[in-house]
Image (cartoon, grey):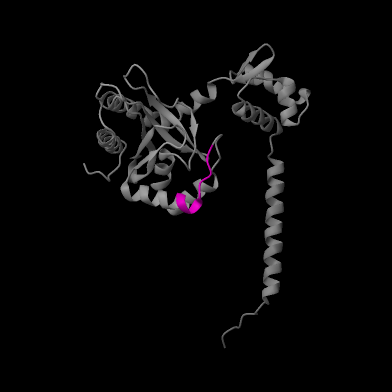
């Protein structure tokens, strides 16, 4: 005769599962505690604090904002200064550019930027507009390359600038060319920027769907009046989303005739397609 399985009541199953989860959580917490590195935590806390501060901070200010004593952080601050991560001036500290330099040694970004820059210079010269390249990073959008307009004035974003994920053309493009699961993780990690406007979630999803269908984003800036943002995707191998190529279009109103918004958009599309091919995308043919 076939052996019968003992049926366990649902309540027992739930209790056992809860106990297993609790045991696993306890084991995980114990493991985290076992391998914790308090000194490293302090160093990272200092770097993260100074990255968000618009002004230089003294040791007292750093200790107060981190909730630690001066004695706890003194040696860490000195070490970070000696290693070139902090710059000191009259007992005040700020971040150096070393973290930014390290980020640019990261091979995927370095390869992308080195490939893109000559074509971005061509784009700026043909459109008479500034252009920048953005990537998604930890809930925000970061500018990794920028070329100024050849005009005697220029409007653009600085390399290293952080912009919003949800209310910018580049953010919409970076969100659009992902699968649903990855897009959900990106939105869950979204970090609001200073001055960022409220975005209705349903409306945002509609804008993302429209951007995906069109293949680009063209929208009036929600940060600067009179600017129209153009953004196109740069894809890599297996059509993986790498970056967004952007132009914040500004219109001249004197007698100088520059390419129109539609003409500029056509050129951005051309350059983004070319970059995608160079980065290994198969979406645009050979």
Residue 123 position within the rendered picture, expressed as x and y whole percent measured from the top left: 29, 28
Residue 229 position within the rendered picture, expressed as x and y whole percent measured from the top left: 38, 35
Say whether residue 57 is left or right of residue 96: right
Say whether residue 135 is left or right of residue 30: left
Name the residue rendered at 45%, 37% in the picture: 222
Quadrant for the C terminus, please.
top left
* Residue nearest the observer in this picture, 43 or 270: 270
221 in relation to 157, above or below: below
Where residue 124 sits, quadrant-wise, is: top left
* Residue nearest the observer in this picture, 2 or 172: 172
Q: Which residues are magenta?
A: 196-204
Residue 50 position within the rendered picture, expressed as x and y whole percent measured from the top left: 63, 26
Name the residue rendered at 75%, 27% in the picture: 64
* Residue nearest the observer in this picture, 225 or 193: 225
32 in relation to 249, above or below: below
Quadrant for the N terminus, please.
bottom right
Residue 200 forms part of the magenta stretch: yes
Say whether residue 45 is left or right of residue 230: right
Name the residue rendered at 71%, 42% in the picture: 34
Residue 98 position within the rendered picture, expressed as x and y whole percent measured from the top left: 53, 21
């Amino acid at each position: 005769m076939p052996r019968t399985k003992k049926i366990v009541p649902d309540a027992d199953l739930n209790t056992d599962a809860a106990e297993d989860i609790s045991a696993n959580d306890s084991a995980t917490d114990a493991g985290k505690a076992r391998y914790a590195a308090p000194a490293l935590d302090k160093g990272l806390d200092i770097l993260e604090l100074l990255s968000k501060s618009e002004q230089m901070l003294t040791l007292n200010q750093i200790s107060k904002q981190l909730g630690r004593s001066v004695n706890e952080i003194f040696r860490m601050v000195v070490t970070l200064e000696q290693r070139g991560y902090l710059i000191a001036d009259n007992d005040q500290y700020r971040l150096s550019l070393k973290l930014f330099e390290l980020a640019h040694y990261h091979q995927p970004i370095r390869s992308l930027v080195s490939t893109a820059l000559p074509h971005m210079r061509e784009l700026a010269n043909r459109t008479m507009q500034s252009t920048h390249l953005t990537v998604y990073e930890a809930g925000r959008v970061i500018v990794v390359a920028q070329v100024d307009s050849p005009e005697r004035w220029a409007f653009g974003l600085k390399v290293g600038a952080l912009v919003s994920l949800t209310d910018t053309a580049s953010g919409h493009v970076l969100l659009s060319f992902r699968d649903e699961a990855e897009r959900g993780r990106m939105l869950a990690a979204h970090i609001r920027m200073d001055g960022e406007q409220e975005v209705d979630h349903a409306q945002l999803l509609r804008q993302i769907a429209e951007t995906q269908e069109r293949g680009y984003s063209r929208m009036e800036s929600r940060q600067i009046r009179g600017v129209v943002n153009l953004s196109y995707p740069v894809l890599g191998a297996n059509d993986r989303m790498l970056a967004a190529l952007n132009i914040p279009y500004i219109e001249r109103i004197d007698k100088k005739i520059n390419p129109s918004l539609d003409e500029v958009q056509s050129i951005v599309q051309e350059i983004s397609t070319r970059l995608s091919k160079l980065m290994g995308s198969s979406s645009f043919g050979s």
